[in-house]
Image: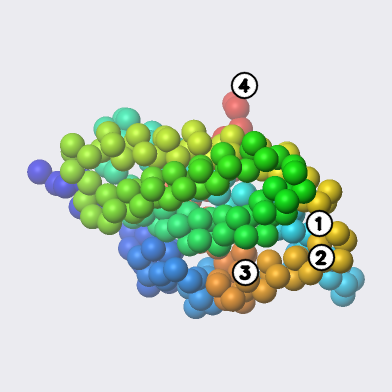
Amino acid sequence: MMSDEARDDRAAPDVRRRNVLGLPVALACGAVVPAACATSTPATLGKQAGQEVPVTPPEDLMREHGVLKRVLLIYREGIRRIGAGEPVPIRPLHAGAGIIRTFIEEYHEELEERYVFPRLVKAGKLTDTVPVLVRQHQRGRVLTGRVLDVTARAVPQRARRDLAADLAAFVRMYEPHEAREDTVVFPAMREVIPPKEFSELAETFEDEEHRRFGPAGFTGVVGQVADIEKTLGIYDLNQFTPRR
């Protein structure tokens, strides 16, 4: 009888092929995504007629949430396949969890906890919300650790339900989490951070992004997410359009 891992490997040759090209962050690239691991070339957002339009700190954080949202879709596909009794897509799930660990938890959330939340609390704003967000960051890291551990090898039949539960718990927590940050937390940044410091913070975010993830930065990580989506057959945006 063919194992889940063997069937998964047979069904997703692109994932195996991209192991050396940088797709599974946790497997191939470690905690930093160097330029050699990026699948896309760097691009400057907002560059028109030779002039560069700076990315503001809230915009930077919000587009990083876009990466998170796309990994949540990868998790949803994993949940669907497990529920349908299909082979567990361990390599795509492991790669997605690797991006959550390196790009979201160890980078994006670190920026929030270092530069955003303390300023809000000091100004007396969102003092009830910030502790909840921090606690959710902590719980998310626990869930990510379990997902990374269980998807590092073939998933035993007895562990499939727990994996699906951890994926579902992560999705359920982070959908309202990021929505609250996008609509309440990040807009409040403008109220508590002076304009000059706001501009300096944008440069700090950009410098940290490229220090950790190489010249491609955000664009390279987006390319990696797209590669995972393609291996799962969920990259084509049109497939999500209602037919009637």
- Report the mark closest to the observer, 1 or 3: 1
Measure the C-alpha gap from mark 2 to mark 3.
Answer: 18 Å
- Give the numbered dot on residue 209: 3
Pick the residue in front: 81 or 125.
125
Report helix, strand or loop for mark 3.
Answer: helix
Q: Between marks 3 and 4, how big is the CA–CA gap?
A: 42 Å
Gap in angstroms between the C-alphas marked 1 and 3:
21 Å
Q: Residue shown at 53%/55% (left/top)?
A: 104
Q: Which mark is residue 244?
A: 4
Amino acid found under the numbered disc labelled 2: Glu
Q: Residues within 10 Å of mark 4 (few under 14, many from 20)?
A: few
Image disc number at residue 193: 1
Q: Residues within 10 Å of mark 1 (few under 14, many from 20)?
A: some
Q: Secondary structure at mark 2?
A: helix
Horizontal side of 14 relative to 204 (left or right) equals left
User: Badges 4 and 1: C-beta atoms under 8 Å apart?
Assistant: no
Residue 153 location (% of width, % of height): 23, 55
